[in-house]
Structures are given as structure tokens and as C-alpha cells.
Amino acid sequence: MPTRLALLLATLVTGLSAISLAAAPPMIAAPAPGDPPLLPRATVAALAEELSGEAAKRNLEFLSRQHRMRGSRGFHAAAEFVAGELRAAGLTAVEIVELPADGKVFYGTQRSRRPWDAEFAELWELAPDGAPGHRLASWDTLPLSLAQDSESANVTAELVDVGMGTTENDYAGKDVRGRIVLVGAQPETVAPLAVERFGAAGMVSYVQNQRTAWWGEDENLVRWGHVGSFNKTPSFAFMVSLKTARALQQRLRGGEKIRLHAEVRAGQHDGHYDVVTATLPGADARLSAEEIVWSCHLDHPRPGANDNASGCATILEVARTLGKLVREGKLERPRRTLRFVFPPEVEGTLALLAGRPELAARIQAAIHLDMVGGGPVTKAIFHVTRGPASLPSFVHDVAAAFGTWLNGQSAAFASGLDAPFPLVAPEGGKEALQADFADLTLGSDHEVYGDSGFGIPALYFNDWPDRYIHTNFDTPANIDPTKLRRAAFLAAASGWFLANAGPQNAAALTSLLEARSLERAGRTLQRRALLPPDEAAALVRFDAWSERGVFASLSRFGAEDAASRAEAARFLAARAQLFGAPPPPPPRPSGDGALVFERNSSVKGPMSVFGYDYLEDHLGAERAKALRLASDATYEALNFVDGRRSAQEIRDALSATYGPLPLADVVEYLRALADAGVLRIGRT
């Protein structure tokens, strides 16, 4: 069947191309080999010549020396450095925006977290006579060894191994009151039992990193830990390697008593989020109020080189490059305003967009970089990621066009062939980029932009996996200047094109979207073949809605004209022939499926943001955790709510995106959102 389907698709695509081209107005000719898409060769050459992976890495090295927790002294030092570099690059309106963070004020769905700083922390094993013996952890040596949000303490206590430490069974037959517990889970998940219920004095965690193929292989890694931002009982936790933990466990199993002394001077305090921002003003009087934003997240523990000093250093290099090329006259000033933003991850972006709604209203598109410099040792795969299915946009096809072209250039160069733009850094590697073009994945600031409360299409460039993420081995030594240079080019080229996009690009963009749309049609045909008839029909209906949305999104940038609109209509009609007879209209929703929900416009943002879960706070942890809808689908379930779609239609859209889902699970989640005040139940 897959072979027959592939042959059928090839035949239909050939026929469709003939239909479309025969009816279409003249389009821009396909680029010659090596010629870049969408931008003039001279523009691409100017970007490629100026962008420097080495300059980006130098800035990364400074950032990686700061322990950049939100609102902390280390974060502020990084913010001041970035602001200084932006001023030196000639950008305007350079500002460190201060947004209050006191644990009480809300920004959309995020309860602000108080800043956290540490001055001193050491964990010692004591000798039998009580004298200091062996130092197990030191803030001065490795700030990562103190879990974020630890509070001050001065404790001498016996160590007790409680396994993972997250279930009551882990504590059966063990007296941990006043003792320090050795745990295999994140301290934040352990504290409610170990500290609050059973009275432990503190924690030592050897939690392992996010699961990848290399999970647990390097027992020397020390993982970034979190105690929790909103704990009822103050506590502390030290983070140690698996190697250290195994040695302690072996001694404890042998009956040895281990006494530890923990001294911590740290804690939360009232303060603010710092968000660095700067602009390169647009030249078009009509369009300069619109903005293209480059985004990263400046926070993370030291060293945090790939995550996310790499994204911040890269957009800093984009800002320097574009500012310099404009000043030198090598590029004309962009039509739209360019803005560069350096916030704390997710919570800072949400605070900025919710706290400065006039800024959010100006943003036409965001380009978000989170982990873009991992060299071969990190095992990273570079992704060019599409936005939410609920927000179809042509901007993702623009990024994919540049990524595909750079894949070809870098692969040709690596293979010893001529390539005019391989974008290799003198101090970097020469491997092919091999960017992967992926559907939406969550976990960074792009999900705030794409939330339906803001509705801003966002590009997302990121590395995954990275075997050293969130550990002491995420160091500048593992960052490749060539990778930084290529990521900077993709971000600069995509953003520069969008900053200048207009009716002059209508023909080229329509042609590009047709090619990408045909690729998506092939994937939809393959998926349809595996579904029962009703699910297959829903998938085809959603596919048609999505593709119409992609072409319609050109109007957001005025990047269309009468000829391109007519061509798009002809193309979409011809494309529909790939799927045979039109799918039957959906049956009229009934029962809970007929419910219609409206979003509360005053509650913007995703439901869970770093240590605070909106539904758990408003509904209780027990009910929130019992909700059955898969976590990835919950983000889009909220986004698909528009006051018009029924619950059945939202279910069908989610099923087209993630695979068949029970209507009852979707309705349960939407009702929970309504009970929490995020939605209102409207007409049926």
C-alpha cells in the first residue's frame, strides 16, 4: 500500500503541477543551483560575509560565566552586558525593562516568581570525630551544586537514602525527621513528602538528566536542581553526581553512618524580572509601527552555554550584523522595525507581552532561538520548527526555505563540492548542517507568542537532543562557532525577509507555499490511509482549513495581490483533487460535543509556566492531575477555542494534529478551563 500510495501521489502531483502552472500568472523562475531563496544574492552575501560565529562565541563565553537565575545578580550582570553590546552595535531604544516579581502579581497565567540569589553554600561529610572531612559540594566551585530556590540553613544531620523519594513507600521504616535525605528525583517533587510531611532537614539529589539515548551514561554529570518557588516549608537541596551518590549508597547499605554538615546562605527576595530590549527602527512610515522580534532566554545556571547562552549570543550577533550593514549602506533600512528581546525563559516573555500589551500588539512575527550551538560532542540535532497547528502561517515556510537551502550548501561543501555559501566559521567545524524540519514541540518562549491570547506566529530554531543540557558539562568548549554562524544566518535571513515583506513578494511567496503545501499533502495522504473513514474525513477537512490559513496569512504582511490571491484559490482547488471526492460534511454536533467555549481575554498564556500551574492553583492538584487529555494536546485545545468552534470541532482539530482523541477527554479539559475562569461556556 505505501508503494502504491507513493506512485499515486507522484502521478497526482505531476498532474496538479500542470493544472496549476497552466492557470497561473507568470511566477518567478526557480533559483539556479546555489542561489538563495527569497532574498537577493547580494543581501545574502552581505549577511554571510558579516556574521561571525567567533564573535558570537566570545559573547557566549562571557554569559556562561554568570549564574543567571531570574532576577538575580548574575542575571543582571548578563543583562547589563547585553545592553552594552547592543548600544555598541548602534541599536536604539536600548532598555532593561523592569517588571515587578513579588510572588503575588500575575502576568497572564503566570504567578510571578520572586528573584533568588545565593551567597554561599557548602556540603561537607564529617569525620567520625565531628571534624570536617570531605567536601561534597560548593557553591563557589560549582553554583549548579545548589538547587535553585534553596533557602538559608545551617544543619548537621545524618544522611538517609530514600530512593527516588517521591512516594510514601520510599519512606517506609525510615525515620527522616531532622535528617538529610538522599534522593533520585528533582527536589521540587520530593519536598512535599520529605520536608513538609516527614520533617527532613534538607535534600541531596542525584537526579539524572532528561531522557535521551545517552541518558545515565556519564555518571560525572551534575544536574540543575529546583527546590520549588512556592513551597510552604523553606528547605534546601544540594545536587551531586551519580558517581558520588552511588558511593554514598554503597556505604549506607554496608551499615555505615554518614553525617553531613550543610551551610547555605541563599533565598528569594522581592525584586523584578529584567528584560533587555533594543530596536532598529523601520524606515517605512506606514509599516515602522509593526515589529519583527528576535527572542531568546537569558536565564540559566552557570555555565548554561548551549542552553541558552547560545541563543542569546546568536541574536546579539544578528543585531550587531544588521545594525552594521545598515549603517554602512550595504543594506537599506528595513521597512518594519526590528526588535531584539532577552528575557528570563517563558515567564519573562509572558511578563513582557502581558505587562506591555502595546508592544505585543505591534509584533508581526517572532524568531526564537533556544539552544543553537551544540557541537558534535553534544549529539544535537538542529531543528527548524513549525508553529501551532492552530495558527497556520507562511512564516514557517520562509524559515524552511532558508534551512533547506543552507542544508544543501553545507552538505555540498562537506562533500568537497563547490558551494558559494557554506557559512563555515574559521574556528568551527565543517560538517553539514542537516537541519530537521519539525512540527511543533513545546518548552520554550515560542509557545507564549503562539498562545491564542497573543496569536503571534513564531519561528523556533533549537537543538535537541543535547546530552549535556542542564548539567555542569554544558560548557563553551562544546559550542561550535560554525553552528552559531549558521543559526545566526537563518535567523537574520528569515527576519530580514519578513521585515521587508510586501506585495512585491506575493508571486515568490505563493510559489513557495504551493511547493510546501504539496509536501504536506503527501504526508496527509499517508496518514489518511491508516485511519478509519470518519477520522480520515476529519483529517482532510482540517488539512484544507490549515492550508487556506497558510495562504491567507500572507495578508498579515500585505504580501499578496489580486494575481496571487487568484492563483492561491486555483491551487487550493486543484490540490483538493489529490484527496479524491470531497469529504462529507461533519455530522451536526450533539450533547457535550455541541458546547462552544470562549476565551477570557484577560487570562493570556499557557497553563503551566515554571513552578506554577494555573489549573492546579485554581482547581486543586488532585483534579488538575486527573485530567486525561495528553499534555501536548492541552496547549492546542486552549488555542483552538475561538467562540465559534464546537467542542466536537476542537476534538477533530486536535485529532488531526495528534491522532484520534476521545471527545470526553477534550470536553473534560475544556470544562476544567471554564471552571478555572480561563474560558466561558458560550452558545451551543
Image (tube, rainbow, N blue to C red):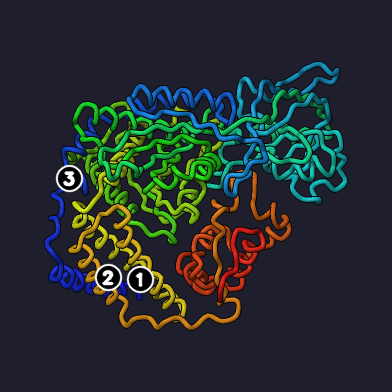
- Which corner quadrant of the image does residue 163 belong to? top right
Residue 642 percent across, percent down from the top left: 49, 65
Q: Residues within 10 Å of mark 3 (few under 14, many from 20)?
A: some
Q: Is residue 70 above or below residue 525?
A: above
Q: Amino acid at mark 1?
A: Ala
Kindly identify which residue carries mark 1.
Answer: 544
Q: Quadrant of the N terminus?
A: bottom left
Query: On the rendered structure, is 508 left or right of 557?
Result: left
Q: SS of the residue at dot 2?
A: helix
As drawn, which residue projects farthest toward the front?
A: 285
Q: Position of residue 256 (x, y in %)?
A: 83, 31
Looking at the picture, tell me which residue is in the foreground, 633 or 157: 633
Measured Cα–Cα span from mark 1 to mark 2? 8 Å
Q: Which residue is mark 3?
A: 34
**Quarter holding the C terminus?**
bottom right
Q: Nearer the viewer, residue 345 or 552?
A: 552
**Vertical arrangement, residue 570 with respect to residue 318, above or below:** below
Camera-nearest residue between 235 and 287: 287
Q: What count of labels does the image hold?
A: 3
Distance, label 3 to label 1, CA atoms, is 33 Å
Please provide percent x and percent y for residue 600: 57, 58
Disc 2 target residue: 572
Q: Residues within 10 Å of mark 2 (few under 14, many from 20)?
A: some
Q: Residue at x 61, y 21 (%)?
A: 141
Dot 3: what SS? loop
Residue 325 lies in quadrant:
top left
**Front-most of residues 536 and 104:** 104
Between discs 1 and 2, the one toward the N terminus:
1
Assess whether mark 2 and mark 1 are in contact (beta carbons under 8 angstroms).
yes
Q: What's the residue type where badge 3 is placed?
A: Gly
Q: Looking at the image, is mark 3 or mark 1 earlier in the sequence?
A: 3
